Image (cartoon, rainbow, N blue to C red):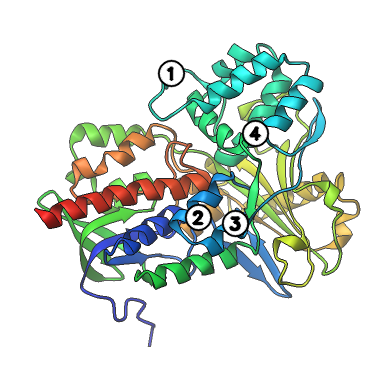
Amino acid sequence: MPRDFLKDTKGQYDVVVIGSGLGGLTVANVLARAGHSVLLLEQHYKLGGLATWFKRPRGQIFDISLHGFPVGMIKSCRRYWSAEIADRIVQLKSIRFDNPMFSLTTAFTRDDFTRLLIERFAVAPATIAAFFDTARGMNFFDDQTTTTGQLFERFFPGRQDVVRLLMEPIVYANGSTLEDPAITYGIVFSNFMSKGVFIFEGGTDHLIRLMQNELVRNGADVRIRCDVERILVDRGRVAGVQVNGRTIKCRAVVSNANLKSTIFDLVGPQHFDRPFVDEAREVRLNNSSTQVYMAFRPGDLIEESTGDLLFSSTAREFRTDLLLSRDITSRTFSFYYPRTRPETPPRCFVVSSTNARHEDWTGLTPEDYEASKRDLIETTLDALERYVPNCRQRIVHAEAATPVTFQHYTKHVAGASFGTKFEGLAVSRNLPEQVGGLYHAGSVGIIMSGWLGAINYGVIVANSVDGELTKRSVS
């Protein structure tokens, strides 16, 4: 008999959370801790969304996105998750840049970037301080007409080398471009620039296991392989969800799915005002990614001076179209040394990430698609050879993921790794004004991308839901 993944669930909950990305997980934990009955539904067989991992035979564990996040993760995890999780967050040692304009290593802090900009790029200290202070002062409500490109031109006119140094890591972190609003760059940049880049020691599998334990301890009902087909609406309010052919009632729904699929697929445009639907249709999807996962032989260790993150490019200039092109010139290599998973036998892994367009990978025949993936792997190995000698002979497993892969496993529209562009934030926040009890906590507005953004947006949304449920209970 097929397994009933909804066995012993209740007929009604205060809140149903759809999707278990870091935003959805955090919403569920905050609300369960506040005493609400919470049902978390995940369509995949693992929790985590893109904060996940996969295993291959002979002890190979690949992290999908454990590549680096700001120091703010420590505070957020300690406050909204547990001290056990926060205490495992550690700083990366060295971030490298290697391109035709410059080659350098940095601790990725404001002090070290200031030193580099003065010593290597001959930028005046006053200009550097003014730029950092401007970025630090940005918030959600600032002017959205100024682009990131215009921000750089204001402080560093004509300095493509400086732009490359300051912009390339943020493109990797959240998919932003020079054409996006400056605040989508400034907020993320400032978060990273405070004290460097961090990861979770123990790997994503250990992190998600700790999060799941915390959810259960706080009373959340957590279910996998539960694919929500419909969010049910009655007289302008959320009434429940239809999942695995069953109806479960609730007072509120928080969707951690893609914003556009939440509105147009799970709810249906007929439940929203026409101007809101028009606004939602205009929301642009953000970029997707390709990745190549590489495992070295057990005990074959990479020299740690290679760096923790390596922003590598052969392009002579920094341009958005080059970053997204199928003719890949820029790759970010994430190196996982034995200290990443200190409890397991010593092993090294490398993940190569590149920004990509979904449309470049769809419409291919199965044969062409597989050939393209093989080419992606081969060209990536060629690029890695510059930094890890004889890597082809030392790597025992390599495989690739594309925007089609991400779409398949996460159901993200067009495999959008970074959700929607900035205009999606207002649409996401205004959902409960359209349908009572309907909320969204996902990757929107670029600034809500990445691990810290996902967790913090989850907290914001959870507080809104808690306030609404408490108010309705009192009334």
Q: Amino acid at mark 1?
A: Thr
Disc nearer the start of the sequence (4/1): 1
Q: Amino acid at mark 3?
A: Pro
Is residue 343 in view from this perspective?
Answer: yes
Measure the alpha-carbon separation of dots 2 and 4: 32 Å
Q: Nearer the viewer, mark 2 or mark 3?
A: 2
Judging from the image, what secondary structure is the residue with disc 1 in? loop
Q: Residue 350 in the image: x percent, y percent?
A: 74, 55
Q: Nearer the viewer, mark 2 or mark 1?
A: 2
Q: Residue 369 in the image: x percent, y percent?
A: 62, 52
Q: Which mark is residue 256?
A: none
Residue drawn at the location 41% of the way across and 20% of the way down: 143
Measure the alpha-carbon separation of dots 2 and 3: 42 Å
The residue nearer to you, when weighing 330 against 349, is 349
Disc nearer the start of the sequence (2/1): 2
Q: Residue 193 in the image: x percent, y percent?
A: 62, 34
Q: Which residue is mark 3?
A: 366
Determine crowd level at label 3: few under 14, some 14-19, many 20+ residues with C-alpha closer than 10 A. Answer: few
Q: Nearer the viewer, mark 2 or mark 4?
A: 2
Measure the alpha-carbon separation of dots 4 and 1: 23 Å
Disc nearer the start of the sequence (2/4): 2
Q: Which mark is residue 77?
A: 2
Q: Amino acid at mark 4?
A: Leu
Q: Nearer the viewer, mark 1 or mark 3?
A: 1
Instruction: Give the side of residue 279 with respect to residue 436, left or right.
Output: right
Judging from the image, what secondary structure is the residue with disc 2 in? helix
Q: Amino acid at mark 2?
A: Cys
Instruction: Give the side of residue 284 with respect to residue 200, left or right.
Output: left
Residue drawn at the location 55% of the way across and 64% of the way down: 84
**Residue contact between numbered discs 1 and 3, judged by CB atoms under 8 Å:** no
Figure quadrant of residue 222: bottom left
Q: Which residue is mark 4?
A: 323
